[in-house]
Image: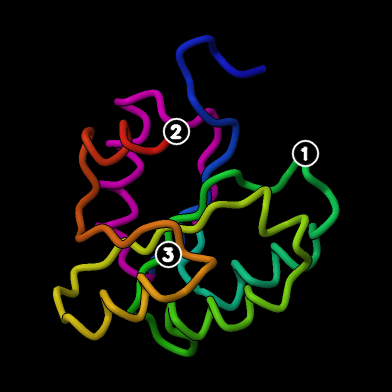
Amino acid sequence: MIDAKTRFQKVMLVDDNAIDLYITTKIIKKNKFAETINHFTSALSALEFLKENETNFTVLPQIVFVDIYMPLMSGFEFMEEYDKLSSDLKNHCKVYIISSSIDENDIKKANEDPNIVAFQVKTITTEFLNSIL
């Protein structure tokens, strides 16, 4: 059961950097943003989890934070595959790109993807979390 002050039941973090995962997790917990945080250090394994649970909304995250630059599959490659998932899943899971990149092309690409809600430069902040309804 969600604590009355917690906004979301489940959040998924997809980032190959252990330090970034740790910092983001601490900020999420401090702000009571999510009850459960699922960590994935590989976009491939995160995508596999979503595919395996595509119709199981009790385990799916409501919010997905994805890094752009990761080995094997980038955040943008992840989003290409994510786009192929069911519309029900995409309506349930809201994706945010969280990246250290300030490249205008990355920001533009993220802003043009209809499955990405927003682009946020690392690290996330309390203000950013508060902006997510």
Tell me the quarter of the image containing the N terminus.
top right
Q: Determine crowd level at label 2: few under 14, some 14-19, many 20+ residues with C-alpha closer than 10 A.
A: few
**Type of amino acid under label 1:** Thr
**Type of amino acid under label 3:** Val
| Residue 27 against residue 93 in the figure, above or below | above
**Image spot of residue 71 (x, y percent):** 40, 86
**Which residue is label 1 attached to?**
58
Q: Quadrant of residue 16?
A: bottom left
Give the magenta range: 16-39
Front: mark 2 or 3? 2
**Image spot of residue 58 (x, y percent):** 77, 39
Q: Tag 2, which secondary structure?
A: loop
**Which residue is label 2 attached to?**
133
**Type of amino acid under label 2:** Leu
Q: Determine crowd level at label 1: few under 14, some 14-19, many 20+ residues with C-alpha closer than 10 A.
A: few
Q: Residue at x 67, y 52 (%)?
A: 91
Whether the residues at callouts 2 and 1 have beta carbons within 8 Å, the answer is no
**Which residue is label 3 attached to?**
66
The alpha-carbon separation of the residues under discs 2 and 3 comes to: 18 Å
Judging depth in this view, the residue of 42 and 85 nearest the camera is: 85
